[in-house]
Amino acid sequence: MGSHRDKPASPRGRARVPEAHAVPRRRSATRFVGRAGVLAALTGITVVLPVSQSALAAAGVPLAFATHVALPSTVEALTAVPPSEQAPSSLLSASGATTAFDASAVERVSRSVERSPLPGCDGIGRAGAKNGLLPASSLCTLFDGHTQLRADAAVALATLDEAYVAKFGSDMCLESGYRTLAQQYAVKAERGGLAATPGTSNHGLGLAVDFCSRETSGARWAWLKENGPLYGFQNPSWAQYGGGGPHEPWHWEFVKGVEAAGTWFG
């Protein structure tokens, strides 16, 4: 006979824990977390109410009025949308609907800025300075980034260039514009009789421009002769072939400015 210890343990003698007992524990933990969240929210409301009442009392609001203010329910307090997520009052119409963004206004402003032929140049012609000694404030830099003209002549040429770009797809090519007195002396020394006497050139007044040679032949030259005068620039008669002066088809002047200065010789 085997001993009692060799006998298999009776199923009834095992200490079995029913599986069903584990489920209530997990559910109990979940319920604890949920209740804790609700209690935290209620605690917040409980703390806020006295503080709010104190603030109202300090502001002179009767406590009787403050105690009758409708407070949110627990559900409303937990599900309310934070003020930061609501639309700003400036975007709400009288009916509470969000006002549509006025994109057309922004577009109009953008177009106005883009339409300026020479941004930063006021286009005001300031006369009176000595030839070749114009102050920087009276000059504007052109679309090529370095050539300068008097402000009114610069805006006129920049406007002409816009039409030119629409036709040929690129800016006009410029050789020179305003020349200081020192620069005119240098040009005179290099070109001799082909250059004006320093102190008399319309380049020194910021009213003359020399185009590159590519602008003086073919379709570009034909276009320039037809359209330049419409924007206030002309190749003076003395610079044309047989005009009595050196043949300079590249030399163009701002007619309104040189006429006012008394240096327009046709």
Image (tube, rainbow, N blue to C red):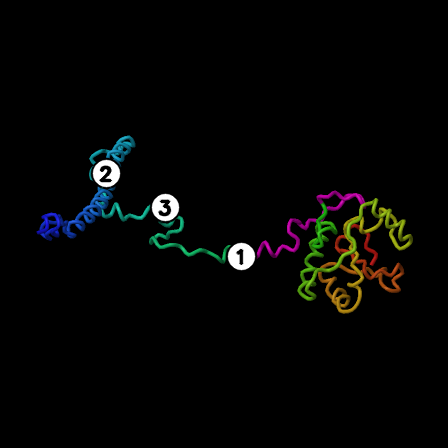
Q: Which residue is mark 3?
A: 84
Cα distance between the residues tagged 2 and 3: 23 Å
Residue lying farthest to the front in this orientation: 1
Q: Position of residue 176 (x, y in %)?
A: 78, 53
Up the image or down, 67 lies above or below 258; here it is: above
In this view of the protein, can residue 34 be seen by the observer?
yes
Specify whether residue 195 is painted magenta. Answer: no
Q: Secondary structure at mark 2?
A: helix
Tell me which residue sits at (68%, 64%) in the image.
Answer: 169
Question: In the drawing, does residue 13 fall left or right of residue 96?
Answer: left
Q: Position of residue 144 (x, y in %)?
A: 71, 54
In this view of the protein, can residue 70 be seen by the observer?
no
Q: Which residue is mark 1?
A: 108
Foreground: 179 or 28? 28
Q: Which residue is mark 2?
A: 43
Q: Position of residue 189 (x, y in %)?
A: 90, 49
Cα distance between the residues tagged 2 and 1: 54 Å
CB of mark 1 within 8 Å of CB of mark 3? Answer: no
Between discs 2 and 3, the one toward the N terminus: 2
Q: Which residues are magenta?
A: 108-137
Q: Residues within 10 Å of mark 2 (few under 14, many from 20)?
A: few
CB of mark 2 within 8 Å of CB of mark 3? Answer: no
Between discs 2 and 1, the one toward the N terminus: 2
Three-letter amino acid code of the residue under disc 1: Arg
Tell me which residue sits at (23%, 37%) in the image.
Answer: 46
Q: Position of residue 258 (x, y in %)?
A: 78, 53
Main SS, magenta region, reads loop
Can you tell which quarter of the image residue 243 is in?
A: bottom right
Three-letter amino acid code of the residue under disc 2: Thr
Q: Secondary structure at mark 3?
A: helix
